[in-house]
Amino acid sequence: MLPTLTPDATADQARAALESAGWREVGTGDWAWVLASPDDTLAARVTPFDPAFRLFADACLAGPPNPFLVRVDDVVRLRHRGYVVVMERLHPADEGRARDLVASLGIPSASDPTPPDGASADLADHPDVVDLRRRIEDLLADGARRYSLWGGADIRPGNILQAADGALRLTDPVFVHGPTVFESIRDGRADRLADFSRADLEDFLRIPAFVPGPDTDALRRALDELVLGDDQRTTS
């Protein structure tokens, strides 16, 4: 069902191959495009560069199943550090139930640490929620060790989705601080970008947040002028 994707394919080429195989785009975020399979049972999240979701997807693959965690079936490597995550197809969740799961996890979002209004934390001691909380805390610690521009947790109702049977799933719970990466490229602050190679940053400017046009062209010129200390780093 998934077309053959080679490790040297770009994210754009991967999307084109998926669309040719009958997959259809169902969502676009800042970092990735999401396509649904022809039978609507799977989703493919395609990105040229998103190190935080890669950590999350790898952790999902490595760990045991959890009924509150999105099921990830595979991570397909693309050019540089781009990839496609093949996972179960999810849909918007009931907002009240999503707020309750966020409150039960009790992990403040770095972007909005205020608990959701009117939410119940009745599931806080549920064994699967306790397990999920521990796994997310481990993921947060791993990200903070790896990236100086680590953003932290992004656990909010909008990142709680639901499966076809209505079961809630947590997805996309952590992030690298993209706005600071953007500002550092724009302002010529190579000292802030030691986490990433030049190829990483070129691919960062190809995520959906950067639409083609003069502003993105200006950022690419600014990147060309940056003197990075890690230009010889590999991007595997």
Image (spheres, rainbow, N blue to C red):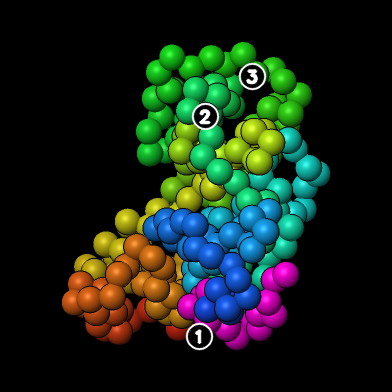
Asked if the magenta segment contains residue 222, the reply would be: no
Image point 39% across, 73% down: which residue?
Answer: 206
Query: Is 53 left, or right, of 228 in this rendering?
Result: right
Helix, strand or loop at mark 2: loop
Task: Give the percent coordinates (x, y) of residue 127.
Answer: 76, 24
Which is nearer the N-term, disc 2 or disc 3?
A: 2
Q: Is residue 143 above or below residue 218?
A: above
Image point 43% across, 58% down: which residue?
Answer: 28
Residue 203, picture quadrant:
bottom left
Q: Which residues are magenta?
A: 1-15
Q: How many marks?
A: 3
Q: Nearer the viewer, mark 2 or mark 1?
A: 2
**Closest to the observer, 35 or 236:** 35
Query: Is 74 left, or right, of 178 in this rendering?
Result: right
Q: Which residue is mark 2?
A: 94
Q: Which residue is mark 3?
A: 124
Asked if the magenta segment contains residue 6, the reply would be: yes
Helix, strand or loop at mark 3: loop
Q: Nearer the viewer, mark 2 or mark 3?
A: 2
Q: Which residue is mark 1?
A: 232
Circle 3: is it few (<14), some (14-19), or many (20+) Cα within 10 Å?
some
Residue 138 in sight from this viewpoint: no
Q: Is residue 136 above or below residue 59?
A: above
**Disc 2/disc 3 C-alpha distance (Å):** 19 Å
Circle 1: is it few (<14), some (14-19), or many (20+) Cα within 10 Å?
few
Tell whether label 1 touches label 2 (CB within 8 Å).
no
Query: Is 5 left, or right, of 120 in this rendering?
Result: right
Tell whether label 3 touches label 1 (CB within 8 Å).
no
Quarter occupied by the N terminus: bottom right
The amino acid type of the residue labelled 2 equals Asp
Task: Give the percent coordinates (x, y) of residue 183.
Answer: 27, 62
Q: Is residue 73 above or below residue 92?
A: below
